[in-house]
Image (tube, rainbow, N blue to C red):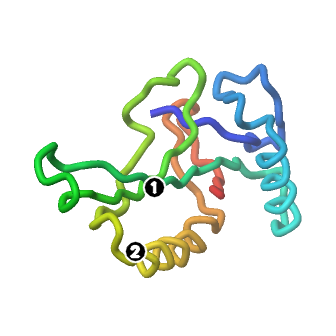
């Protein structure tokens, strides 16, 4: 499944790459890119991708609406414009009762996010190479 990166492993930030997503050009993405570059010993030799976390609520069933609200927490990896409607980029992280205190779940996810933000070598099927990647 192709993922969009803010920066490729050569340090390039460009909108003419195959993996470009318009979100990559927004101010928040540029700020994240600068922060990650400042924290890295080799800031231009790494692919950098974005994850978007969001939560929402929905009703499990139409009957007894007041008692069956559900809360969900998801993460979405930015996908390419060519693949913008893919169902393979969003993953459910947690499900709970809406209205309950879900802060401990969110805190746990944020702690785990610190581990995910560390750079690591991953296989890229598009290039058939091992590349260094980091997500924020």
Give the answer, above or below, for where 70 lies relative to 41: above
The image's mark for residue 55 is: 1
Q: Secondary structure at mark 2?
A: loop
Cβ atoms at labels 1 and 2 below 8 Å apart: yes
Which quarter of the figure has residue 116?
A: bottom right
Residue 18 position in % (x across, y down): 66, 22
Q: Nearer the viewer, residue 29 or 59?
A: 59
Q: Nearer the viewer, residue 12 or 69?
A: 69
Q: Nearer the viewer, residue 107 or 6?
A: 107
Give the answer, above or below, for where 125 lies relative to 98: above
Residue 93 position in % (x across, y down): 37, 60
Q: Seen from this angle, which residue lies furthest left?
A: 63
Residue 47 position in % (x across, y down): 70, 47
Q: CA distance from mark 1 to mark 2?
A: 11 Å
Q: Which residue is drawn at the image coordinates 37% and 32% (left, top)?
A: 87
Quadrant location of the C terminus in the rendered image: bottom right
Quadrant location of the N terminus in the rendered image: top left
Q: Seen from this angle, which residue lies furthest bottom?
A: 104
Q: Residues within 10 Å of mark 2 (few under 14, many from 20)?
A: some
Q: Residues within 10 Å of mark 1 (few under 14, many from 20)?
A: some
Residue 28 position in % (x across, y down): 79, 49
Q: Which residue is mark 2?
A: 102
Point out the tag, 1 or 2, that comes first from the N-terminus. 1
Q: Is residue 51 left or right of residue 31?
A: left
Q: Is residue 16 left or right of residue 104?
A: right
Q: Nearer the viewer, residue 35 or 133?
A: 35
Q: Which residue is drawn at the image coordinates 53% and 30% (left, top)?
A: 126
Q: Secondary structure at mark 1?
A: strand
Q: Which residue is drawn at the image coordinates 42% and 43% (left, top)?
A: 90
């Amino acid at each position: 499944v192709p993922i969009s990166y803010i920066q490729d492993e050569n340090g390039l930030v460009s909108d003419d790459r195959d993996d470009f997503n318009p979100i990559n050009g927004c101010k928040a993405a540029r700020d994240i890119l600068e922060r990650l570059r400042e924290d890295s010993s080799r800031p231009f030799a790494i692919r950098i991708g974005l994850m978007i976390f969001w939560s929402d609520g929905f009703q499990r069933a139409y009957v007894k609406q007041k008692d069956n609200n559900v809360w969900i927490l998801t993460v979405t990896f930015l996908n390419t414009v060519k693949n913008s409607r893919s169902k393979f980029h969003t993953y459910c992280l947690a499900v709970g009762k809406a209205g309950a205190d879900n802060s401990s779940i969110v805190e746990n996810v944020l702690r785990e996010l610190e581990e995910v933000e560390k750079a690591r070598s991953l296989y890229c099927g598009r290039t058939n190479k091992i590349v260094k990647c980091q997500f924020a």
